[in-house]
Amino acid sequence: MIFSECLFSENNSDGTYNPIFDEDLSWDDATWILTSSFIILTMQTGFGLLESGCVSLKNEVNIMMKNVVDIVFGGLTYWLFGFGLSFGKDYSNPFIAFGWFALDANIQVMGPIFSTFLFQLSFATTATTIVSGAMAERCNFRAYCLFSLVNTVVYCIPAGWIWGSHGFLKHLGAIDIGGSGAVHLIGGSSALVAAWMLGPRLGRYENGTDPLPMGSPTNALLGLFMLWWGWLAFSSGSVFGVSGHKWKYSARASVTTINASFGGGFMGLVYSYVRTKGKFDILDLISGVLGSLVSVTGGCALFKPWEAVVIGFIGGAFACFGIPFFDWLRIDDPVGAISVHGLAAFWGVLAIGLFADGENLLNLTKGNSGLFKGGGFYLLGVQFLAAICFATWSITVTFCLLWSINKFIPIRMEAHEELLGADLVEHGIRRPGVGVSRALSALGSHPNVDLEAANSIGINPGHQIALQKYINERNLKKDTNGHANQDLPPTGPTATGPSQAWFY
């Protein structure tokens, strides 16, 4: 993201940026930023559909609820302190900033500040949502709510390192335009720790490490499409405007993003065909496409279109090959978030150090070029340092947060609850045909589960009551007259007559 240059910037004599506050952010830039933010926030729907499609049917509502919580709780804490810890102006050092807590602004400056806040908010909630998929089907919902509330700190501080005017990575010349490191590597590293701490789902590796059946492949594919198109806003919006030369780089970011997905999708199909000996697995394709998008995002405005295809192909490979690798380690990740957002993101951060053009229109690289562009090893070294810093921070802080939460609320569901499914246990929703009745029969009653009180989805209780009344009345008249009453409809209740009084 380049908002610090666009929003708070003024060129020094050496061509680098001296961030200051710029009250003259153009309205067309703000419109671009806000529109991109709206689109990125709709990607939450894509995450929800994808994750719910990958888990068993008795947990799909629960995973959608977690995505709602990420916006509600994660958004609240990002407004309260997250934005201020990234970009506050009251005090800062190379590692952290303070100020703009419970963000507000006067009329003179509220345009650029609020536009920036909303865009950053969409990134912050994405970083948290990545973790929810890796924790699926065995995480205590209450514990997850608390984690979503405090997880803001995992994202907001390293975001300041790379995008804040005070950040040490920014001053070293590290580049991460669309968040391969600050969003996806942060989220993927958190997912790794969360999945490891929770342990595998019950019975996950009893019959080997082959993928489990998906709950709804169609939902997963719909989620992919929503993420795919939303990613165009994710990348092009990160150029942070369309005024001056920025529109050129926004267009370039869009092309490299879509081109990368070609390479990743091709990788996913080939990998799946070979792995399954002639079949095309849905999750392999999804992982290939998403891995490519993650890997190209950080340098989306700096790559050539053909380079994006190569970067996406390699990113897709990291995602596809990473999933069975973590299963081999017995780290259970139901949606492949660790590989897609962790391994592919690490590659994406390094790819900038290899392929980045040393452009001079917006000075995005501050004079540095990638290794393959004659820039030497400096940028590659800085990018490697940034990737290590992001991963180390996220792993350490996530572990501390989940360890602390577990002292108050167990982060893992009880075995009894996991077998019954989070939809029933956490949300009182009963879905027929998913094994809940069999689990209750085998396990016996549970104090936290009232199967009779649970709401059966897809059924209108009012219709059931009305139908029962009709049946009772018909039986009563049969008993009274000794035969069926010919005045009653012979085929049961209909809505075609002028009155439904016979019902009652």
Image (spheres, rainbow, N blue to C red):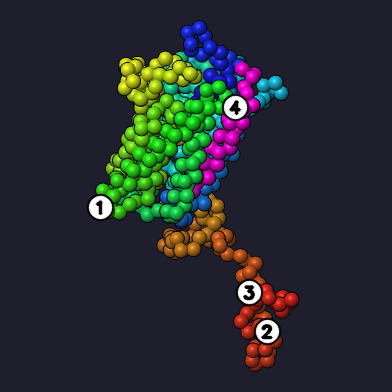
User: Which is nearer the N-term, disc 4 or disc 1?
Assistant: 4
Residue where numbered disc 4 is placed: 29
Task: For label 4, count other residues whose C-alpha is less than 10 Å away and answer few (under 14), some (14-19) or many (20+).
Answer: many
Residue where numbered disc 2 is placed: 488
User: Which is nearer the N-term, disc 1 or disc 3?
Assistant: 1
Nearer the camera: disc 1 or disc 2: 1
Say if the magenta span includes residue 123. Answer: no
Residue where numbered disc 1 is placed: 277
Q: In the rendered structure, which amino acid carries the disc numbered 4? A: Asp
Magenta span: 22-49
Residue 489: x and y in percent read: 66, 83
Q: Mark 3 and mark 2: span between their CA atoms?
A: 14 Å
Residue where numbered disc 3 is placed: 467
- Residue located at (27% from left, 48% from top): 275
Secondary element at tag 4:
helix
Outermost residue, top direction? 13
Nearer the camera: disc 4 or disc 1: 4
Q: Do labels 1 and 2 touch, CB within 8 Å? A: no
Q: In the rendered structure, which amino acid carries the disc numbered 1? A: Lys
